[in-house]
Image: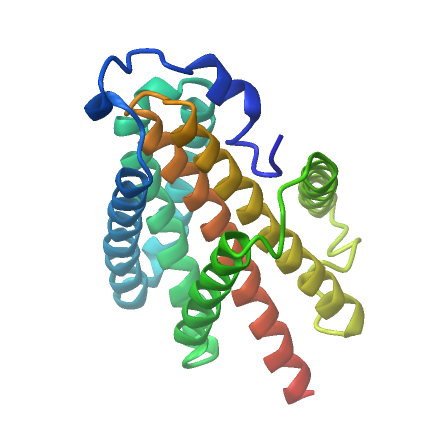
Amino acid sequence: MAGNPAFNDKTFDKFQNVGAQSDTDRMTMEGTVTKGLILLGLAVASATFAWIVAATNPGAAMGLLLVGALGGLVTALITSFRPQGAAITGPIYALLEGLALGTISSLFDAKIKGIVLTAVVITLSLLMMMFLLYRARIIRATPVFLKVVFAATGAIALSYLISIVASLFGFRDVLGLNSSGPLGIGISLVIIVVACLNFVGDFALIERGVEQGSPKFMEWYAAFGVMVTLFWLYLEVLRLLAKLQGNNRN
């Protein structure tokens, strides 16, 4: 079990050796990394487009954000329930999420210059750090560890949902998620730590998929799962930096 809802043991067990008749049909670590880079490249290209549109035509920003966020959510759910189609839905998800991330990044950068580049550097640095910690087995994906990460991720998702529903009824930031004070900053730090720990579960299941001979299409699904965590981490880093900047201005 991994914290990332896109990944779980049953998914990889279900497709163990399905359609993998030869070595070339099997999931590999190199193939997964390649697919991950492709998805990341698509997201960056889409985000760049959305940034330019949002910067030159602010009226279109909300439309891009809604299309990207809602479309990305629907595509992510489809991919999670049907991994066999990840070669198609994975790239679509990356493009849609790129629209949302690019729009959000443009809005943040308009208020705080340079914040996006800093967030990108920190996010990629955290990804690399977690990969190195996992490879060195300094952090191990034990059953207890994964259960704790899963529970923490679920609690965070629930808090997001409560905050959104409350805002619809006029209650703004009831849980302090958007506060720039000590509570809000502390919450962001906890969420970032949990997001980083999700990578450990992602890496462990990818390694397991390779070892048990999962079919080639699982490379796309595995890459998609890592992108889900990466995009989440980036948004939380961006939010934390904005909170810190707002706190410094006060």
Q: How many labels does the image show?
A: 0
The residue sitting at 30% across, 62% down in the picture is: 51
Res 79 quadrant in image: top left
Q: In this view, does 28 lie to the left or right of 235?
A: left
> Residue 46: percent from the left, percent from the top?
26, 51
> Residue 32: percent from the left, percent from the top?
32, 39
> Residue 54: percent from the left, percent from the top?
32, 61
Quadrant including the N terminus: top right
User: Colour scheme used in the picture?
Assistant: rainbow
Q: Which of 214 and 46 is in front in this view?
A: 214
The residue sitting at 65% across, 87% down in the picture is: 248
- Is 187 above or below relative to 157? below
Q: Nearer the viewer, residue 213 or 44?
A: 213
The residue sitting at 45% across, 37% down in the picture is: 207
Q: Is residue 165 left or right of residue 99?
A: right
> Residue 203: percent from the left, percent from the top?
49, 43
The residue sitting at 39% across, 74% down in the picture is: 117
Res 242 quadrant in image: bottom right
